[in-house]
Amino acid sequence: MIDIPGPGVEVCMATLYLTEQYSVVKLEGETLRVQAAGGRNGDAIRVPLNKIEQIMVLGEITLTTPALHELLKRRIPVHYLTAWGHSCGALVADWGKNSGVRLAQYALAGDVARGFGVARACIAGKLQNMRTLLLRYARGRDDDTALQEAAQTIRRCLRDLERLEPPADTNDRMHGLGPLLGLEGSASAAYYGVLGTLLKGAWNFTGRVKRPPTDPVNAALSFGYTLLTNQTVSLIHAVGLDPGLGVLHQPGFGKPALALDIVEMFRPIIVDSVVMTMINTGQLTPRDFEEELGAYRLRDSARRTFLEKFEARLNEQVQHPLFGYRVHYRRCIELQVRLFAKYAQGEIERYVPFTVR
């Protein structure tokens, strides 16, 4: 992480996070000049453009038109989120020149058998990584029956997943993916059902609640999942694919379906791992969250630490299960996107999910 002093500005490797409410971002030469609301000119912070690959804007922050034009020219995406961490959308440059890869993506979406294979791989990767995370925490807790049963449930779902065949009829409301989604739902219920027992302290986490998150743990998970999805949208655009058309998640207005497909494999090992580690090491406490009308969110003071840990996890190296060399998690996500593109274009025989041991 590049340390740039000043409130509300974080440059974590290639991602610039803007969090100071009502600040203004202007173009100044080869830098972005970030001026806090009510601040003096001498207090402005300057961030070199050549250090930035994407920008996350959280809340009421203004980027001037010249700044946005330069970002588009440099193909630097800008993701807009509310102060609560909900994604509003992204400003990205025009499509890349490789229209062939998008045509192959659209053809794949209409191919029932091939699309089903990719959807099954995405779910299998998610389930395998959920089980791996539980087993890591189960070490030294041989007497934890609930934890062992949850891991076994996920394993059974993985076995059943392998036996599923592409549907003959995709005209139902689940688009032929009902059996896949049923197994994913059963495994996720078992996983989130025991996750709270792995957290130190009284967090009252009993399962996943999304819209809105009704407890601090769900608020942290939702915030992390949103960040991870936006990171993936940027990588999908860089490869030249359409983030709005996936095979597991159905397309919808403003919905990054392909990003959500790819993200499934990385949720447990990136976001869940960060949240659990921060809670169990005391870096997150219930006081770091605020509640409004039954919904929770991270306080601004805690969000900085969360962003640091999230980016540190993305930049942590791991041995890639398919290629065998060590690479950081951010690159692993990009490789999954590129593998999807290669499979869509018929360059590889099957889409292999990303899993860890």
Image (spheres, rainbow, N blue to C red):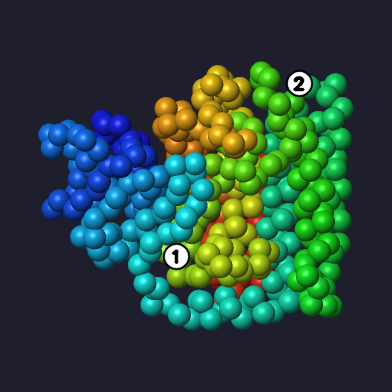
Q: Is residue 168 above or below residue 331?
A: below
Question: Residue 343, which numbered label?
Answer: none
Quadrant in the picture for residue 207: top right
Residue under label 1, please give it. Answer: 237
Q: Position of residue 282 (x, y in %)?
A: 55, 19
Q: Is residue 209 above or below residue 256?
A: above
Residue under label 2, please give it. Answer: 140
Q: Residue at x 63, y 40 (%)?
A: 213
Q: Residue furthest front?
A: 293
Residue 197 visible, this orientation: yes
Q: Earlier in the sequence, mark 2 or mark 1?
A: 2
Q: Position of residue 305 (x, y in %)?
A: 44, 29
Q: Residue at x 79, y 43 (%)?
A: 189
Q: Residue at x 60, y 48 (%)?
A: 266
Horizontal relation, residue 182 to residue 343: left or right: right
Horizontal relation, residue 350 to residue 42: left or right: right
Q: Position of residue 271 (x, y in %)?
A: 58, 40
Q: Which kind of residue does numbered mark 1 sit on?
A: His
Q: Residue at x 53, y 53 (%)?
A: 229
Horizontal relation, residue 298 to residue 127: left or right: left
Q: Secondary structure at mark 2?
A: loop
Nearer to me, 244 or 187: 244
Q: Which kind of residue does numbered mark 2 sit on?
A: Gly
